[in-house]
Image (cartoon, helix red, strand yellow):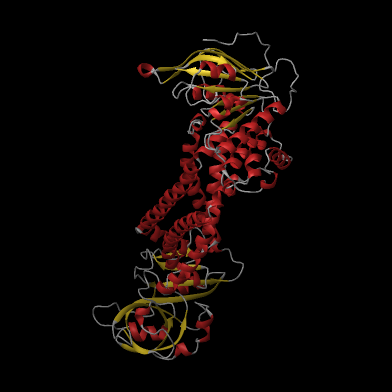
Amino acid sequence: MPTPLALLNLIHDRKKFLTSLAGVSFAVLLMFLFTGFQNALYDSQTQLLEQLNGDIVIINRLKENMFVPRAFARRRLYQAQSFDGVEGAYAIYTSDARWKNPDTKEARPVRVIAYNPADPVLPMPEVLAHQRQLTLPNTALIDSRARAELGPREAGVVTELANRQIRIIGTFALGTDFAAGNGNLIMSDQNFLRYFADRGPEEDERSFATADIGLLKLVPGTDVDRLVQTLRQNLPQDVLVLPKDGPEGFIRRERTYWEENTNIGFVFSLLTAMGFVVGIILVYQILYTDIADHWSEYATLKAMGYGNGFLFGVVIQEAIILSVLGFIPGFLISALFYNLVAGVTGLLFVMTLERVVNLYITTFMMCLISGTIAVRKVQRTDPAEVFGL
Amino acid sequence: MSTVPVQPVSPLPPSPGPDSPGPDSPGTEVSVQVQALDYFFGQGDLQKQVLFDINLELHRGQIVIMTGPSGSGKTTLLTLIGALRSTTAGSLRVLGQELVGLGNRQLVEVRRNIGFIFQAHNLFESLTAAQNVEMAVELTGHLRQKRQQATAILEKVGLGDRVDYKPAALSGGQKQRVAIARALVNQPQLILADEPTAALDKQSGRDVVTLMQQLAQEQDCCILMVTHDNRILDVADRIINLVDGRLESDTNPQQFVETHTVKSLDRNMFVM
């Protein structure tokens, strides 16, 4: 085995080595945080949709994204229900309303999600457990991951929603997104009417004639895409029929909307790129210092008959070692930060394997670029210079 | 001005392996042959000639010391012979290989058969003495016996008990001996040394040159040493003196002292 010169040179000065690793870890942390925010903002937009228990979604053709308050005629759902393969058709009603923080008496917008509690629309265990209690008048479930501005998010809270009294009978865990304001409430469709049927002249009147999202549950084994085609051909053109999942699906469409119509992507890509550049500069400094410190030794190696390829190898090895050993602590600290930030903001911070691998590849590229810049210095080393030094 | 007469030499096979030819194989007597060598620094109007018509022949088993005032071109000549610079004028045969007109890649090949010793030891602080020496062995591809070879040569230079020490734990003289071990471990036929004793005290310097002398005799190689250190001139078989880029004299130490009345020289130093 050849002498592991790269590794030994790196770890020779423990203090410097640890500082170097801390530098790389910091760059990794920056990139993880910025891509994390970016992904969280996108992921959060679709987390409610992911939870919906159905295969096909029917919405108003004008509802470009979850922000647009366009409802569609509920009879379309009954029409859809008559097709083969449709097991159930559920209407979901959503509306924004002002929620009064019971402690500060400050009103904050929240999103109300309503449906018939008998329908398995959101099969989360906490929701199912309160199925019967939801049918009581003026009750709702609150999202335990809603923002702290709403006050205590727990069962037993009594406050006002849209200027009517409301009693919280339980919690569920979902999280916030742009359209949700400060958080989500779940209530029965009957209660939804109580709050939103007549809110005064300036607000839309809501009734069971229209629904915001229609959810079709299919008989297991039904070809989703074919049924979507059939429904599109047979239902009137005022509604849009989409599969829930898949590249053409409702969730993907919502995500694409946020990706393409907001600056989130650009801003966070820019910040991530800055983290990347900071990393390149840091690693370059580390490698350059190593080369400068061992200038005459490297030149001696060249005099002895080592070629540029060998020196290139040493510097690149150092870059790779730094990328691996710097990534691990950077990743662990980031995972910790993800938990922390998710807790504070209610956004969805997910560390998927794919994202970790992608970020490692980015880190590796970062170190490689630094290595390539730094190595040009060694390659210019003139071995004749060591004489008479 | 005396120059060594040029003798026709039968060419060696190009870049012989470090351990292949024995001392008695034909044609290996001449290690370095320099003919009509000129060398210039710079280009165009700024071009400056530093070496003028150098003719020189170095033989195996010889220790040759090159002296001369600073700026006389000693180091330049040494780096040319060491295949560390390329040149286009004249002829420069090292270990049977003509260096004039060689490309960088081929020069690197030639360098593998030459041992280099510098004024600074240039050891990697992060490697042990043995590992530093092993770096040289690895060039030959003998990865299996590298530890053995390194240990053996370190024992020869008297550092058998310091094999696994890092340079920081060694004295100046010991470090220079590790550097010598590194230069000699592949048994090169030519060793080029640049002020190897300059950074050492009198005793360590003396030890180092004695060691070089011993090993040169054992391995029958040629040593070309640039030095200003008058204390070690006595180990030389020949002393060549370079002044302003020209070979000024080529003598043995005895004559050198007689012709160069340097006030600081003490004749007793050259008693062998």
Q: Position of residue A119 (x, y in %)?
A: 50, 80
The image quarter containing residue B131 is top right
Q: Between residues B72 and A387, which one lies in front from this camera angle? A: B72
The image quarter containing residue B223 is top right
The image quarter containing residue A348 is bottom left
**Is residue A258 among what the camera can see?**
yes
Q: Is residue A177 left or right of residue A244?
A: left
Taking the spot 49% from the left edge, 72% from the top edge, the residue there is A52
Q: Position of residue B80 (x, y in %)?
A: 53, 22
Q: Between residues B231 and B86, which one lies in front from this camera angle? A: B231
Please tell me whether residue A324 is drawn above or below residue A115 in the rendered image.
above
Q: How many marks?
A: 0
**Is residue B101 among what the camera can see?**
no
Please tell me whether residue B265 is drawn above or below residue A372 in the rendered image.
above
Q: Is residue A2 left or right of residue A267?
A: right
Q: Between residues A219 and A203, which one lies in front from this camera angle? A: A203
Q: Position of residue A329 (x, y in %)?
A: 52, 61
Q: Position of residue A123 (x, y in %)?
A: 53, 78
Taking the spot 46% from the left edge, 44% from the top edge, the residue there is A288
Please tell me whether residue A119 is drawn above or below residue A340 in the rendered image.
below
Taking the spot 44% from the left edge, 65% from the top edge, the residue there is A40
Q: Quadrant of the N terminus of chain A?
A: top right
Q: Is residue B154 left or right of residue A54?
A: right
Q: Between residues A289 and A210, which one lies in front from this camera angle? A: A289
The residue sitting at the left extreme is A201
Q: Is residue A89 left or right of residue B93?
A: left
